[in-house]
Image (spheres, rainbow, N blue to C red):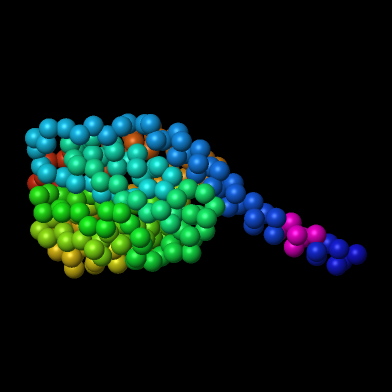
């Protein structure tokens, strides 16, 4: 009798473990569909400071944040594609497997950033760290003399140690300053709607602060 209970409990646990990735990837698909058409990027006249926004996004949240930043700052926008981590179960399991790595198959691998004063680097958080595609981008590019801002979207938690390690690499690759911005979207069952995420970015990230004030606040 006891054995029957144990087998039942183990079976139930295995079923739940199998269902979690299915549910997570289903939610990611819904988000990606919903977010794709929001706030399209509008390339503009480049009147002020020269800013590049480079980002990786799997399910569209960092992508929406990136378009919003680029539109707000009149910036050039570059998306990093990483086919290993495409939406779906296979991409999700590759993301879990590689989550803390600093290498990834990305396209483009290099971008000529020499004409920019500021570079925003966007990424989701995977297993408490910025995802491998943006870390790989840092490894293959130079940021000489630039203000670099890492921005992350995440559900509930990241570890500052991974951000500190990211900063070290960015500075080693030439950046003159580094800042970190992050927006917490909440756990999967109760997440910030996209409009609220953008509102929070506008309120908390000081995107359009004058340059002098920004430099004074660099972390
Ligand atoms: C493989 C994987 C690992 C994740 N790990 C974390 C984590 O450690 N902490 C967290 O708060 N969110 C984690 N998330 C959630 C994402 O960071 C969050 O949903 C993010 O906003 C997704 O951005 P995107 O839509 O641009 O891909 C993880 C997501 C994936 C796919």
Residue at the (41%, 35%) spot, across then down? 35
The reply to whether residue 120 is in sight is yes
Location of residue 103 in the rendering, given as x and y in whole percent from the top left corner: 34, 65
Residue at the (38%, 38%) spot, across then down? 197
In this view, 90 is above or below 34: below
Q: Is residue 52 inside the magenta stretch? A: no
- Which of 48/181 is in front? 48
Location of residue 179 in the rendering, given as x and y in whole percent from the top left corner: 23, 54
Location of residue 106 in the rendering, given as x and y in whole percent from the top left corner: 33, 57
Q: Which residues are magenta?
A: 8-13
Query: Which of the image's four quarters has the N terminus?
Result: bottom right
In this view, 170 is above or below 121: below
**Dominant secondary structure of the residues highlighted in magenta in the image:** helix
Residue at the (29%, 42%) spot, across then down? 66
Q: Is residue 12 inside the magenta stretch? A: yes
Q: Dividing the picture into quarters, in which one does residue 62 lie?
A: top left
Location of residue 43 in the rendering, given as x and y in whole percent from the top left corner: 20, 34
The reply to whether residue 130 is in sight is no
In this view, 169 is above or below 148: below
Residue at the (23%, 39%) spot, across then down? 70
């Amino acid at each position: 009798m006891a054995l029957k209970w144990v087998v039942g409990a183990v079976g139930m646990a295995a079923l739940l473990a199998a269902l979690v990735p299915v549910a997570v990837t289903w939610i990611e698909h819904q988000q990606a569909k919903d977010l794709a058409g929001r706030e399209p990027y509008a390339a503009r006249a480049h009147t002020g400071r020269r800013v590049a926004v480079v980002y990786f996004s799997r399910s569209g949240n960092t992508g929406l944040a990136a378009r919003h930043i680029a539109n707000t700052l009149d910036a050039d926008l570059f998306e990093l594609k990483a086919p290993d981590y495409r939406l779906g179960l296979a991409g999700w399991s590759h993301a879990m497997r590689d989550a803390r790595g600093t290498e990834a198959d990305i396209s483009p691998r290099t971008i000529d950033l020499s004409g920019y004063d500021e570079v925003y680097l966007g990424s989701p958080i995977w297993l408490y760290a910025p995802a491998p595609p943006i870390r790989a981008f840092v490894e293959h590019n130079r940021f000489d003399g630039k203000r670099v801002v890492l921005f992350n979207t995440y559900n509930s938690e990241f570890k500052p140690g991974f951000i500190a390690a990211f900063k070290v690499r960015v500075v080693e690759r030439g950046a003159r300053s580094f800042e970190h911005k992050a927006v917490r979207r909440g756990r999967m069952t109760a997440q910030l709607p996209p409009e609220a995420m953008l509102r929070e970015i506008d309120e908390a990230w000081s995107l359009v602060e004058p340059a002098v004030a920004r430099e004074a606040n660099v972390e």
